[in-house]
Image (spheres, rainbow, N blue to C red):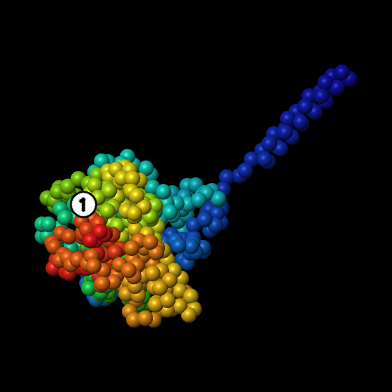
């Protein structure tokens, strides 16, 4: 009995061991067969990767503002420098690297027939299955930084040109048009030295604004092409300023333009709206900078029509394939050619004089309107330098109705602020504004402020006597600056005549005869924004005879 009992206990324990082994074995996952793995991979990849560049399948999801980057495919040779030449078959879409586009690092772009890590290849077993919920890197336009994407910080060099050089990305593009543009730059021996001289004043600010927006550094070169960095530049069609903005475009973008002030010539205002406009074009043309630049030059409507014409013929719609006006066809090549020279000056035997990689000016609040000649004296700089920084100011004084500020060279800020704090009220220009009411007339308003009708007309650029209720008039003198009827009378026994000489200014003449600039303007019905001319006759009424 004892023996039997022991025997049964042994059998029971063996049964438990066998049962446990069977249960553990049943919990193991059977290895996937190739067909099973492929099915799982296909199911997973469908939710994360729509298709592979070069495949015919339609993408399952359309990303907002995403740029499709097809891979390179064999195609017949086409002269990309002749936009009128039609290829025998459609060319690959914009973003494919060829002899006229920025060359792309092949190690980072998916190629047809090459297995990509983490991306399912149709009909090919994957070594691993992509994990759902893991964000996949987007494909950017080759060599172009995307707006809104923060770039890795780089230690800033002392030379601004070197800073620009570090961030250029289009210079590897090759084209006959680019070669011609580059040769044209190099033939102009004074072009680059002159640009560097002007760059001292404006380029740092432009580079800063471009980098804040993570735009391609090539965008900072556009004012060199548009205006040779001259804020006073005017084009034959009416474009003005560093960025050569047209009057209607400027008004549409919110730039103030009147007889006292032109925001298209103002360094800060024009740069802001130009970059705003370029960014809007970039997104309008599917995040293609070359098309955005073409639209900036020729207008978005013209570029869109050129694309539609190519689509109708089954042709590619990228910049290099479009039939555009000659100046637009050569516009992007000019930008790239200049980028190549800046990127490799030694290669092209060019020397760029160093430009300090630091702010060149600062906005200073004057607290009131100020004559520009007086401001130059207070900053201890010449008037030409002050006007170059404040090119938007068209008259002799800071524009009425605008903020009381002026741009001053960074090294002159402290002395300017100190000197302006020492001015007496009599040395400052006084202004008021008046909103025209129903029933008003110029004569009634002039009488109200004790000034001449001609003064109101001249200062406010009014032709004739018609005014409109709701408009704003600028009133000089605020009733106490001397622009009164008594001072405009030709019967004043203290009247003196003065012939303007070379180098004269309103401020200098006013100081010599102890009168104000406003008084000279009123007595002579001068254009407040015009400069004096040698030989011009002025009527003056010096105090005390």
Estimate the x, y position of residue 171 in percent, counting from the top left. 24, 55
Residue 187 location, x and y as percent?
Answer: 10, 60
Mark count: 1
Q: In this view, does 314 lie to the left or right of 333?
A: right
x, y percent for residue 460: 35, 71
> What residue is pinned by disc 1?
382
Quadrant in the picture for residue 255: bottom left
Quadrant (top left, top right, bottom left, bottom right) of the C terminus: bottom left
Does residue 362 appear to the left or right of 343 in the view shown?
right
Quadrant position of residue 27: top right
Position of residue 330 measured from the top left corner of the image (x, y, whole percent): 22, 68
SS for dot 1: loop
Q: Eyeballing the image, is 417 above or below 498?
A: above
Q: Which residue is drawn at 52% across and 56% down?
A: 48
Mark 1 Cα shell of 10 Å, populated few (<14), some (14-19), many (≥20): few
* Residue plotted at (47% across, 47% down): 127
* Front-most of residues 381 and 521: 521
Q: Is residue 66 left or right of residue 304?
A: right
Which residue appears at 53% of the width and 53% of the height? 41
Q: What residue is rendered at 42% in x and 78% in y?
A: 441
The answer, for residue 59, to whether it is visible in the render is yes
* Of residues 395 and 179, the one drawn nearer to the viewer in this rendering: 395
Extreme residue toward the top, this view: 2
Foreground residue among 485 and 463: 485
In the image, is 322 to the left or to the right of 349?
right
Q: Quadrant of the N terminus?
A: top right
Indicate whether 368 appears above or below 452: above
Tell me if residue 173 can be seen: no
């Amino acid at each position: 009995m004892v023996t039997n009992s022991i025997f049964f206990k042994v059998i029971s324990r063996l049964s438990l061991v066998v049962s446990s082994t069977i249960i553990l074995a049943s919990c193991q996952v059977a290895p996937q067969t190739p067909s099973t793995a492929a099915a799982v991979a296909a199911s997973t990849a469908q939710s994360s990767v729509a298709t592979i560049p070069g495949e015919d399948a339609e993408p399952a999801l359309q990303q907002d503002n995403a740029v499709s980057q097809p891979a390179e495919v064999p195609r017949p040779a086409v002269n990309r420098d002749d936009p009128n030449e039609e290829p025998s078959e459609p060319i690959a879409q914009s973003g494919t690297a060829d002899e006229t586009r920025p060359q792309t690092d092949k190690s980072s772009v998916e190629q047809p027939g090459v297995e990509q890590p983490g991306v399912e290849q149709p009909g090919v077993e994957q070594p691993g299955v992509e994990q759902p919920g893991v964000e996949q890197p987007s494909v950017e336009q080759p060599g172009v930084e995307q707006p809104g994407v923060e770039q890795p910080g780089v230690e800033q060099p002392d030379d601004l040109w070197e800073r620009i050089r570090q961030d250029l990305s289009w210079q590897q593009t090759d084209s006959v048009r680019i070669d011609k543009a580059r040769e044209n730059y190099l033939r102009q021996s004074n072009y680059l030295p002159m640009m560097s001289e002007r760059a001292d004043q404006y380029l740092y600010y432009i580079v800063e604004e471009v980098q804040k927006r993570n735009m391609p550094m090539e965008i900072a070169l556009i004012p060199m092409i548009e205006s040779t960095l001259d804020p006073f530049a005017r084009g034959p069609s009416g474009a003005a300023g560093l960025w050569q903005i047209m009057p209607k475009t400027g008004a549409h973008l919110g730039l103030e333009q009147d007889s006292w002030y032109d925001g298209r010539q103002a360094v800060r205002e024009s740069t802001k709206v130009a970059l705003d406009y370029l960014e809007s074009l970039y997104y309008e043309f599917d995040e293609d900078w070359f098309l955005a630049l073409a639209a900036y030059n020729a207008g978005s409507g013209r570029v869109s029509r050129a694309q539609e014409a190519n689509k109708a013929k089954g042709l590619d719609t990228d910049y290099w394939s479009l039939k555009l006006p000659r100046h637009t066809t050569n516009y992007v090549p000019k930008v790239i050619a200049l980028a190549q020279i800046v990127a490799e000056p030694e290669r092209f035997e060019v020397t760029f004089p160093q430009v300090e990689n630091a702010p060149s000016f600062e906005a200073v609040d004057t607290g009131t309107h100020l004559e520009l000649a007086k401001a130059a004296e207070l900053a201890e700089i010449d008037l030409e330098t002050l006007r170059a920084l404040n090119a938007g100011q068209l008259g002799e004084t800071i524009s009425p109705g605008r903020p009381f500020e002026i741009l001053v060279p960074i090294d002159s800020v402290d002395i300017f602020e100190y000197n302006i704090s020492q001015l007496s009220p009599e040395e400052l220009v006084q202004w008021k504004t008046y909103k025209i009411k129903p029933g008003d007339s110029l004569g009634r308003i002039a009488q109200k402020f004790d000034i001449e009708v001609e003064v109101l007309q001249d200062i406010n650029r009014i032709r004739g006597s018609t005014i409109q209720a709701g408009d704003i008039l600028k009133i000089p003198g605020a009733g106490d600056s001397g622009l009164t009827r008594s001072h405009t009378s030709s019967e004043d026994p203290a009247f003196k005549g003065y012939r303007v000489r070379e180098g004269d200014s309103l401020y200098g003449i006013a100081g010599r005869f102890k009168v104000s600039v406003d008084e000279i303007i009123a007595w002579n019905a001068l254009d407040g924004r015009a400069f004096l001319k040698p030989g011009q006759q002025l009527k003056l009424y010096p105090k005390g005879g």
